[in-house]
Amino acid sequence: MAEGGGGARRRAPALLEAARARYESLHISDDVFGESGPDSGGNPFYSTSAASHSSSAASSDDERERPGPPPPPPPGAPDAQEAEEDEAGAGWSATLRDRPPPRFEDTGGPTRKMPPSASAMDFFQLFVPDNVLKNMVVQTNMYAKKFQERFGSDGAWAEVTLTEMKAFLGYMISTSISHCESVLSIWSGGFYSNRSLALVMSQARFEKILKYFHVVAFRSSQTTHGLYKVQPFLDSLQNGFDSAFRPSQTQVLHEPLIDEDPVFIATCTERELRKRKKRKFSLWVRQCSSTGFIIQIYVHLKEGGGPDGLDALKNKPQLHSMVARSLCRNAAGKNYIIFTGPSITSLTLFEELEKQEIYCCGLLSPRKSDCTGLPPSMLSNPATPPARGQHRIKMKGNMSLICWYNKGPFRFLTNAYSPVQQGVIIKRKTGEIPCPLAVEAFAAHLSYICKYDDKYSKYFISHKPNKTWQQVFWFAISIAINNAYILYKMSDAYHVKRLHSIFTGSGLQLQKPLCSSLRSNASSIQV
């Protein structure tokens, strides 16, 4: 038995590395820009701890990403001069011109001023108000009634109340964020037991509410969407995000780190890992790169194994372009600058968004990106690697294609930054490395999002029900909690109350005062 436990512990770092490697398109860090070892220790994804991606693994992954020397041209292929003429005919030119950045005069931040006496619950209910919770009460009672009419009466069931629904959500949040072994750990006699919380509601009552819990009990005749049981809640949550916060000009499209629970991966047996079901949906977000506030959520549901299913599209440009268009549908006309990873970056998409006054800056990969319409000379590597910090740029209209070298080529496509303006990448070991301004901006904003996501992803609600709509619901609640904490940190209430914990996770810092309310008064239970 001891040997099996040791094997599970030895597998944990490799499993975590594999899980995080799926998000390599977003992890623009010191290591990706050519450094490794101690120089990359400040980035959480490239530390040497067992809970993070090791710097050596990241370096080797990066080496595999980099294309080798260009193959010899096939017989009959056009020479360099003909290729240059073809690119010029398509509008690409090495002649660069300066262009002003997109004007942005809006002031980002909270749209309403919360009083200094505001509680954690006040911020959370900006997104999940009582009328939403009351609807959950009604729908849960409706589902319980219909269920019992079909399968027989349940004598132990009594209609749930608003107070009980708040307590139920509070239990789910508390046990998940504290990484309890089970949602029933509060009533156990083990390490995670909590007598003061256990007195608020009996275990039997909690299990009954969990059995019948619903956001939408029944499908309407007009409903065809696979997430009909949670879509009204997602729409309400989105309206809350839109009305409570104005984002900054710079934002990021990406898929947050919610795939695996680090505690589960580090402690599970091989049999448990095999039994763990894969998610049947993909969750993408548009996130403010100045504060970490998640502005918009998009859920792509795998509705089958056909050619339009998630499995068939997850590595193809059509899925990612569809995701980007959906996430940016409310951003038109505001001169936002959107940063994207290689899976989303494409000339066609960027030109389409530019017509809507949405500007982009994305990392480009010849293997992962849709390179249609881009000059081939910028996608191939020269036989002799250029010196570190050198770059090549070609321009078409407002679009710039940048190939920047730093122990390997890195390509960027942007219409948000002038190609003639210079920036710098600051390295702790080697000092400053010159680069175009777009490269510096991309590295700065993506580095912030990586560090922020690594922190708050540890506090996502780790409860994994079998139903897809329930998984989406708990992920959405997690996002609401973290957005509420961001608003709390930006308010006067934070400076007055200074609600801190010994942990740095935003979800736990919001959850701690919420659970204090649970302990203090069962009649005023807080989520």
Image (cartoon, grey):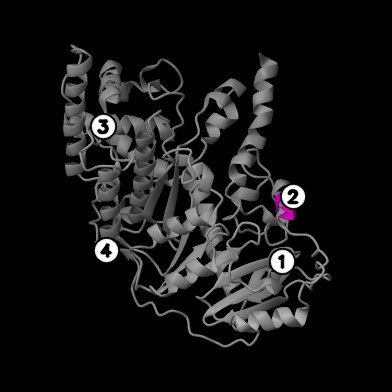
Q: Nearer the viewer, residue 228 or 5?
A: 228
Residue 225 drawn at (x, y percent): 31, 43
Residue 185 drawn at (x, y percent): 40, 21
* Label 2 – label 4 distance at C-alpha: 45 Å
Label 2: state its secondary structure: helix
Callout 2 crowding tier (Cα within 10 Å): few <14, some 14–19, many ≥20: few
The picture quadrant where one finds residue 419 is bottom right
Instruction: Quadrant for the C terminus, please.
Output: top left
- Give the number of callouts: 4
Residue 495 drawn at (x, y percent): 34, 56
The residue pinned by badge 1 equals: 409
Residue drawn at x 67%, y 30% as measured from the top left: 11
Label 1: state its secondary structure: strand
Amino acid carrying label 2: it is: Ser
Callout 1 crowding tier (Cα within 10 Å): few <14, some 14–19, many ≥20: many
Label 4: state its secondary structure: loop
Residue 431 drawn at (x, y percent): 72, 69
The residue pinned by badge 4 equals: 111
On screen, residue 345 versus residue 8, left or right, reads: left
The label on residue 214 is 3
Label 3: state its secondary structure: loop
